[in-house]
Amino acid sequence: MGKNTPGEKRNSLSRRELLTAGPLAAAGLAAGNFAGARESKLVPQAMKKQHEQLPRFKYDIESSVGWTGEGGSAKEANVEEFPISDSIAGVSMRLKPGGLRELHWHAVAAEWAYVIKGKVRTSVISPDGKAESSDFEAGDVWYFPRGHGHALQCLGPEEAHFILAFDNGHFSEFGTFSITDWVSLTPPRVAARNLGLPESLVTGLPKGELYIGKGKIPPVVPEAMRNGISDTNQLSHKFRLGELKPILFPGGQERIVSSVEFPIQTTVTGVLMDLKPGALREMHWHPNADEWQYYISGKARVGIFGAHGRELVDEFGPGNVAFIKQGFGHYIEQVGSEPTQVLIVLNAGIYQEISISSWLAANPPSIIADNFGWTKEQVARLPKSQLGIIG
Ligand SMILES: [Fe+2]
Ligand SMILES: [Fe+2]
């Protein structure tokens, strides 16, 4: 132990070198220093049983066919297309100017959205009868609790593109509770009586679901609700994530919206992460949530650690989705000369993270030295606090 190695000839290594070159190489350790590591290979026979390989954790949502109509289009990733993603389903939706995602609700999932491009007006009703209509643009987030009725319309002049995330991987956007589907399936006698309309009008409705229809661009100033009630919901459904002051790191920045910043958003946390070229989002895990990622721009390599000797690495680019199970270790290594922007959704309303650097810092040096078979001098080089995004 304690032999000088090439790494030790330098006074210190950068944090980036420490974490990108691999723990042993970066710490400048030579063979023969690994008493702890060698022992760790002596795994009891009973523990050597075969474990299933880690399932694929990448899905190219934008290359899927999805649904296209006159008013817009939608592509989805749920357990059908992307089996590992059993707790979060995602949809990439585009609405043409005036395009209307009709009045509907979701029986089994809350809806979270992030607007990438264009403008959208929403209306939503909660069980207490209070309603809210809001306008959204790039960088804005909405959250509609499970079962709350809502509708979306593109305000133009350009197409709107937004990412929807649902807190249930078994949710399908192509099977929602839509108002046209319900009315057209109800006996005309009942529907006409309920709606106060002639039965002939109800009978003449097209059968089935409109889903996304062609509409007219609504007026700039929002119209009053039909019931004239202006008592809006006290818990706003809108959060301006793009306007939130980011947490800055040497390698980039993060904007995090949890239920702390946006009280209605109780079941998910959203993160907008920007990585500079060459950055590394450090090794970490989330004790309380699965992680769903959508790559907006740029590229990255993601590595996940699933215990039992299992690790997977894959590369992601615009339109790709990643899913990382709760508690799995992972990192994001930026790739390419263009910055990378990632939208992240975690299925918990409170954000929790433990990073390898903060964990190692929160231990006595002798434990770390014994664990890895490192000298105290080598341990002293390890980071002493959370690094976040390494530059
Ligand atoms: Fe919806
Ligand atoms: Fe993460």
Image: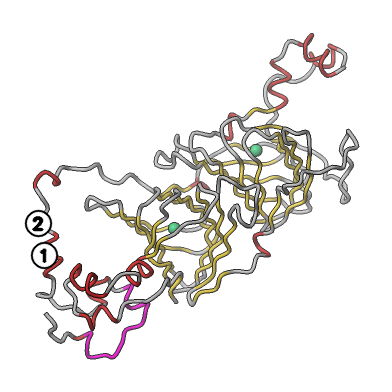
- The residue under label 2 is 42
Q: Answer left or right for 320 relative to 237.
A: left
Residue 100, given in percent of the width and then of the height, sits at 74, 39
Inter-mark Cα distance, 2 to 1:
7 Å
Quadrant assignment for ligand 2: bottom left
- Give the camera-side residue of 105 and 230: 230
For the record, the magenta segment spans 7-20
Q: How many marks?
A: 2
Question: Residue visible at 67% across and 22% down?
Answer: 208
Tell me which corner region of the image, top left, top right, bottom left or bottom right, holds residue 34. bottom left
Element under disc 2: loop
Q: Is residue 354 above or below residue 8?
A: above
Placement of the C terminus among the 4 image quadrants? bottom left
Residue highlighted by disc 1: 38
What residue do we see at 31% from left, 55% from top?
A: 305
Main secondary structure type of the part rendered in magenta: helix
With 283 as the anchor, is 8 left or right in this view?
left
Q: 153 or 124, which lies in front?
A: 124
**Tag 1: Cα neighbours inside 10 Å, few (<14), some, or many (≥20)?**
few
Name the residue at 49% across, 34% down.
170
Labels 2 and 1 touching (C-beta < 8 A): yes
Q: Position of residue 266 (x, y in %)?
A: 59, 46
> Quadrant location of the N terminus?
bottom left
